Image (cartoon, rainbow, N blue to C red):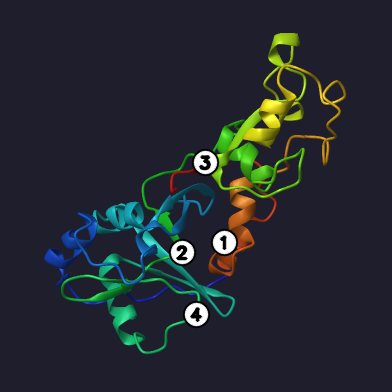
Amino acid sequence: MPGGRVSEGAGPSRIAKSADTVESGESAVSGSRALEASVLVLNRAYVAVRVVNVRRAFCLLCRDLAEVVHCEDGHFAQFSFDAWLDWCQSRSESRGANDDWIRAVTFEIQAPRIIRLLRYDRIPRQQMHLSRRNVLARDGHVCQYCGRHFPTSQLSIDHVLPRSRGGQTTWDNVVCACLACNVRKGGRTPQEARMKLIRQPAKPARNPVLAIKLNNPKYATWRAWLEGVSWELGVRDA
């Protein structure tokens, strides 16, 4: 667990109605995607257990089920919702390029990047879930036959050895394929269809969606809690 300092907190709650506004989703968003940004969730023992969006994180904070863990300059501090709001007000003029801010009716608040659950001790099971989303993320949304990048709506999952020929839905037998290449290959093997795979499919070392997020400067502070983590973390945000 990273070393750090703990904040003293702020005064009594004075923003109940405003907090309810954020929780219910009635706030005006500063930036179209601020409420859908990602937040890493730690359990009470500071073990990463899930990724949620900012909207869900604020629901947990407003209900006193979680606290904000803020990392800066190699240290971390913990804040209740009220203390976090006060801290945000004190630095509203010094916003970082990768920060997300949300404008509510009576205040502005920075979206947290990490929260810690106050009453949850469980840890995720050490397994990698095979899903369409994870396969597309593993392959970078690139068709493994033609090598072109496509939006999610124009991609499918192809079984290298077709299911009609006994192929299984396993990490080493499914790849991301564009619709045209999938139709062209049909129920044949790549060799039979004279199509070559860009690379052989394999099980990734960690959650592919999580790996993509770690390459985003927004989520650089997650690394301290994810170093060495290879299991699947639930990712609830879109």
Name which quarter of the figure residue 224 lies in: bottom right
Task: Write down the residue under mark 4.
Answer: 97
Name which quarter of the figure residue 161 lies in: top right
Whether residue 69 sits left or right of residue 176 in the image: it is left
Q: N-terminal of the two: label 2 or label 1?
A: 2
Whether residue 55 sits left or right of residue 197 in the image: it is left
Determine crowd level at label 2: few under 14, some 14-19, many 20+ residues with C-alpha closer than 10 A: many
SS category of the residue bearing label 4: loop
Specify the farthest residue to the left. Answer: 17
Q: N-terminal of the two: label 2 or label 4?
A: 4
Residue 164 x/y as whole percent: 70, 10
Residue 222's disc is 1
Residue pictured at 60% horizontal, 39% vertical = 134
Residue pictured at 32% horizontal, 55% vertical = 55
Give the CA separation, mark 4 to mark 1: 17 Å
Of badges 1 and 3, the one in the foreground is 3
Task: Write down the residue under mark 2.
Answer: 113
